[in-house]
Image (cartoon, coloured by chain):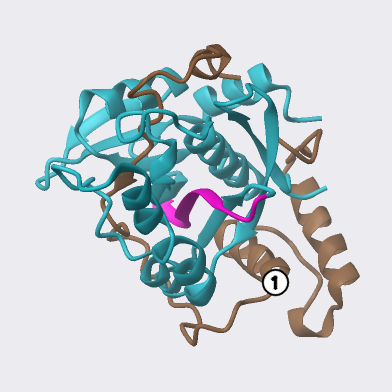
């Protein structure tokens, strides 16, 4: 068996667990399923908003395209209604900062659909998408022989840092653009897999 | 499940999942940028090979392998690296 085909997210309306299919995203599909949908649908739900989200300018069509250039993967989690509930883009040719001399997977972009963000809408649709996508990336890291190591540069809000800390990421240094380098070590990744009972 | 996900409620601020500093400086390995979707199995094998150059592999031309051949090769490479299999198809 290769990587799992689905991640499990939870419907906030019903509390039921829903399988979201992992789909590969390329320029056209990213444009059609994310760029053309996410923010327009949010605006339909909320009307005018006071401030823009930090990722609102992200162009997933270009991100998916760049995945080809950087030898990476761009994946989305698609629920049965055909909507992409979250997306992630990563490469496998980065360096670990926690364990010098080893390679790490690097998450360049990850985001949930805006209608799943509790601070944007009164009733989010699904929860758990972002965490499951990061778990998927960590598992891909493991399947590539990188022992689950994952690095990323997190936006600097406390909510974000707390979220990554809760998964097991270690906070490293700050970048000049005020993002923060964080890394999931091999040990923490394996502990996560054990908790989840993922590996045979 | 993480602690966060065991909580049945969907509180505000519960789903902040953004990271985004773009691509790292050390990820400049060139790949086909034609926009044509790459063969995912072939890509997986090439990536494994690049990450583990010490793997002793007997195949020469990846393009000569069909999907089954690529799957077997991938499995063989993972076995050589001691990589266990995922226990289920959904996580």
Residue at image location 46% in from the left, 57% down from the top: A91
Q: In this view, does B14 lie above or below A7?
A: above
Residue at image location 81% in from the left, 33% down from the top: B87
Q: In this view, does B50 lie to the left or right of A3?
A: left
Q: Nearer the viewer, residue B12 or A104?
A: B12
Q: Nearer the viewer, residue A142 or A41?
A: A41
Q: The cyan chain is which one?
A: A
Q: Nearer the viewer, residue A143 or A11?
A: A11
Per the rendered image, the range of residues in magenta is A81-96
Q: Which of B32 and A20 is in front in this view?
A: A20
Q: Position of residue B26 (x, y in %)?
A: 32, 60
Label 1: chain letter: B
Q: Determine the main secondary structure of the stretch shown in magenta.
A: strand
- What color does chain B have in the rendering? brown
Q: Position of residue A151 (x, y in %)?
A: 39, 41
Residue B37 sits in quarter: bottom right
Where, quadrant-wise, is the C terminus of chain A in this rendering?
Answer: top right
| Residue A6 in sight from this viewpoint | yes
Q: Does the magenta stretch include residue A199?
A: no
Tell me how many marks there are: 1
Q: Position of residue A182 (x, y in %)?
A: 32, 34
Residue B66 sits in quarter: bottom right
Q: Position of residue A111 (x, y in %)?
A: 40, 46
Q: Provide the residue designation for mark 1.
A: B42
Q: What element carries label 1?
A: helix
Residue at image location 81% in from the left, 70% down from the top: B58
């Amino acid at each position: 068996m290769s990587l799992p085909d689905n991640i499990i997210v939870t419907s906030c309306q019903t509390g039921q667990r829903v399988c979201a299919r992992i789909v590969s995203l390329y320029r056209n599909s990213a444009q059609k399923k994310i760029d053309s949908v996410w923010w327009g649908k949010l605006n339909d739900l909320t009307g005018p908003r006071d401030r823009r989200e930090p990722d609102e300018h992200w162009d997933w069509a270009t991100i998916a395209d760049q995945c080809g250039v950087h030898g990476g993967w761009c994946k989305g989690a698609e629920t049965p209604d055909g909507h992409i509930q979250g997306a992630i883009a990563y490469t496998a040719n980065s360096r670990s900062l926690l364990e010098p001399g080893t390679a790490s997977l690097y998450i360049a972009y990850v985001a949930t659909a805006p209608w799943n963000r509790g601070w944007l809408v009164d009733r989010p649709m699904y929860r758990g998408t972002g965490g499951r996508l990061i778990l998927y990336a960590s598992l891909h890291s493991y399947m590539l022989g990188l022992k689950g190591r994952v690095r990323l540069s997190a936006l600097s809000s406390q909510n974000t840092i707390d979220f990554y800390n809760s998964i097991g990421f270690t906070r490293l240094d700050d970048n000049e653009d005020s993002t923060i380098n964080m890394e999931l070590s091999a040990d923490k990744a394996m502990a996560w897999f054990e908790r989840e009972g993922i590996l045979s | 499940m993480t602690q966060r996900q065991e909580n049945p409620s969907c509180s505000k601020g519960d789903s902040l999942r953004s990271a985004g500093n773009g691509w790292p400086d050390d990820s400049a390995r060139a790949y086909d940028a034609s926009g044509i979707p790459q063969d995912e199995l072939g890509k997986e094998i090439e990536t494994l090979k690049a990450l583990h150059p010490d793997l002793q592999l007997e195949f020469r031309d990846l393009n000569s392998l069909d999907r089954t051949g690529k799957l077997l090769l991938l499995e063989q490479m993972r076995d050589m690296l001691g990589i266990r299999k995922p226990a289920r198809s959904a996580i």
